[in-house]
Image (cartoon, rainbow, N blue to C red):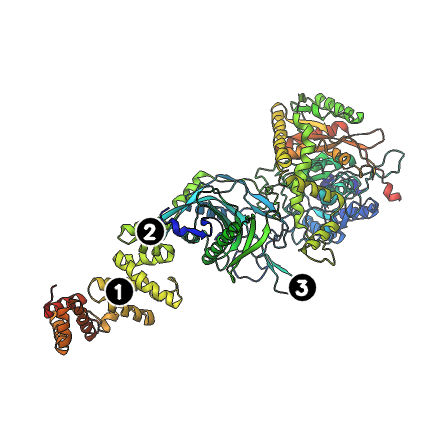
Amino acid sequence: MSDPTELTLAEARDAVAAKKISSRELTSAFLKAMEAARPLNAYITETPDRALEMAAASDERIAKGQSRPLEGLPLAIKDLFCTKGVRTTAGSHILHNFVPPYESTVSQNLWNAGAVMLGKTNLDEFAMGSSNETSFFGPVISPWRSKNSNAKLVPGGSSGGSAAATSAGMCLASTATDTGGSIRQPAALTGTVGLKPTYGRCSRWGIVAFASSLDQAGPITRTVRDAAIMLKAMAGVDPKDSTSVDTAVPDYEAGLETGVKGLRIGIPSEYRVDGAPLEIDDLWTRAVGWLKSQGAEIVDISLPHTKYALATYYIVAPAEASSNLARYDGVRYGHRAAGTEDLIDLYEKSRAEGFGAEVRRRILIGTYVLSAGYYDAYYLRAQKVRALIARDFSRAFQACDVLLTPATPGPAFGVGDKTADPVAMYLNDVFTVTVNLAGLPGLSVPAGLTAAGLPLGLQLIGKAFDEATVLRAGRAIELAANFSAKPTAWWRAA
Amino acid sequence: MNSTDSRYIQGSTGPWEIVIGLEVHCQVLSKAKLFSGASTEFGADPNAQVSFIDAAMPGMLPVINKFCVEQAVRTGLGLKAQINLISVFDRKNYFYPDLPAGYQISQYKSPIVGEGEVLIDLPGGETARIGIERLHLEQDAGKSLHDQHPDHSYVDLNRSGIALMEIVSRPDMRSSEEAAAYLKKLRAIVRYLGTCDGNMDEGSMRADVNVSVRKPGAPLGTRCEIKNVNSVRFVAQAIEFEARRQVDVLESGGAIKQETRLFDSRTGETRSMRSKEEAHDYRYFPDPDLLPLVLEQAWVDRIATSLPELPDEKKSRFVAMGLSAYDALVLVAEKEAADYFEAMLKEGAEPKAAANWLNNEYFGRLNKSGLSIVNGPVPAASNATIVNMVGENIISGKIAKDVLDIVWAEGGEPRSLVESRGLKQVTDASAIERAVDNVIAANPDKVAAAKAKPQLAGWFVGQVMKATGGKANPTVVNAIVKNRLGLPE
């Protein structure tokens, strides 16, 4: 076998099952790749010992003919999923020393399916960011570079570590979370596939909460098929999460190649925004042509409340975050400031030292919009707009089966380019937040390159719990786009 | 408004009316907490009953305990209240070390139970209706321990997450007696329902007391809230003190500031804790980790049919048996007392006699010994037998008390005791006549006096009873004494 780190998850699965490669060989190859790619800063914590132990156990099972669906396949876990006995930081100083005594449901599901953990990937602090630059553990550097440039680019965020690791061959696939685009945007920026499932499809239990009504776990993978395989293993109702939904999890992989003949694809006019690069628009138009030629029906759709989505999101998400992050107070676990005078001092110093600027900004925004006298004007109104946005989608889905939009308003940007302007940063999520507000499944598929050679993604949005159709349409785009670009492994030379 | 005068405070500018509303926190009787599976048992070592959820570890999520919901619905039905089929859990945000998540899950805008009522029993057999505004479910906080270390405070999270029902009354009470009666009645109702043990010593029931005063007929005055008062007596004391304080402030030209106050049980006084300006902005919003709580009417109906008989209904039934309203009230105040009484009826005791016996004899002995009806030494069957023997003229009332004393001290079956110790009442007229004649013969001076003043016949009855060791039937003795003295029957 040439370089096992270049295999897709599906290929690796088949190779392991056919005993062409052992899990230990596969895992060792990834551990080596991780070591070589440390300049990208994609992992906060590498767990090589555990990885090799799990791989050995998988090899034993394979030898006994007791393989499970992901047997022996090495994955990266976003450092927002609590992992028993392995430090879980949420990319924050305040949890820099936190070792959970429990395992998140989603990661446990993966281990129960036989997967191997390579380590915990970097992310924006508490998943708040679109460039992976707010992490206490430093920014993740994208494996991608513009043609003829050595400038460091961001991988997107907040799941920048998972996206970079998946893109650069540091894992077969990874877990991620998406509150406003944190799976789909970094996937689009790194040429990977990112799937945010329907709210309630995957358990949130054991995932450090950012905004509870929006957070959802999903995979970042190299192919649509891999996303289908990962989702099947991650998803399912969980009695420990009251918002998880008890509905059957289909075999997504089985229906993947059904094609889009007869499928009604909605094109929402509101996603055509002024000032977006022509390359995005062109790609979108090209994709419409691909689907049409494969027999899909193209339907023009209006989602009239789209323009309020970003403002709504930046009220709802910080409001919930301000409450969710109140537990990090230096009393029971995590960072506690030294030499404090009294209780208030302990709270203030621990939190001021423990949280970075972006997290502090969102806690302040959230506290403000929930305050007496402002609640009605901000939080309550945002909830009403949120309901209207959801209604836009349910009306749209009377006329179509899946929506096609750009995933992001542009390709990857330079490290430090947008850190001074929070609103410019927030605008990265303009095409993705609507999906979280409506609780729908969204898939980002790499579909082309900019002239500078940077990946661009398209987004497919489906009906609630209809990830199967989203994946099927995503597979059609993937086939037509024939996206095969890979980042040059410049970090190996360095 | 019959007993108006006693309900007013007399100030230097005339009478003032007290207006009282109570927010009572009742710990839900449940083995597990409201949103976690941790145990709720009282008295465990600190932090021995804490789940990851109760400690607000990262990524932990609450899951509602259905039994606690059932208990809240049961209580709501017992308060004859509206059951809201859709209710919402909100987060009440504030920082404190005994509140691990930085918010308490409570119900703010949409409680599980709406308006209801409690009938309270006033002296003189009157009742008054106290409105219930709402009942909502919420989590209890942990406990800060400040007395364990010279320069550290500790936190015990055993209580963190235990289910509470907060029962909010309308400001319908007008005196400390009414407030005490309300609290007692509420306690009786939840204990009958089995939804709260009502144990105020262990903090299972605590009251926040809202007090204001006004001139009769005037609009409501500014109220003060006295937090966490943990006995009926303290509630009454706190109201008395607080109302008087407010009247004094107003009459000396001051104004009442809306504030939260604390009651000091050692001094019987209330003191300021924080003003309205210092009050927290709790930033309530619906808890996104929990879906709205949706109940099915059929499920509520099933709970309704399983409701036990409550104090008011029981009292009416007892009165219909011939008990006085007062006796009935005393018996139903504690479910165990009513159960004991009904157990006596099952043994054939006549209701009125049984009630009198319990209220006049047995409860007094229990009180004196510091015992309760459940740990008292005499079984209901024994008390029933004693009452039955009096009714059957086998023993006199006086002997009955002796029999009770023996059973209390030594145990044993009352009928065989009476038999074996020769305590049976003497109804044989000739034996009694002999005893009467002996007394008359020995006391000629008293005979003369009694003839002049017939009430003195009672002295002869007493002497005869003494001479017969109390075993003579007093009615028969009385008749024979009058006959022998030549007095009219």
Element type at marker 3?
loop
Q: Position of residue A237 (x, y in %)?
A: 59, 42
Is residue B328 shown left or right of residue A436? Answer: left
Residue drawn at the location 62% of the way across and 45% of the way down: B281
Element type at marker 2?
helix
Mark 3 residue type: Asp
In front: mark 2 or mark 1?
A: 2
Q: Position of residue A241 (x, y in %)?
A: 59, 44
In front: mark 1 or mark 3?
A: 3
Label 2: chain? B
Label pair 2/1, CB-CB below 8 angstroms: no
Q: Which mark is residue B151?
A: 3
Q: Position of residue B488 (x, y in %)?
A: 11, 64
Q: Which residue is mark 2?
A: B125
The answer to whether residue A47 of the structure is visible from this angle is yes
The answer to whether residue A67 of the structure is visible from this angle is no
Label 1: chain? B
Above-or-below relation of B148 to B273: below
Mark 1 residue type: Ile
Q: Categorize mark 1 by other alpha carbons within 10 Å: few (<14), some (14-19), many (20+).
A: many
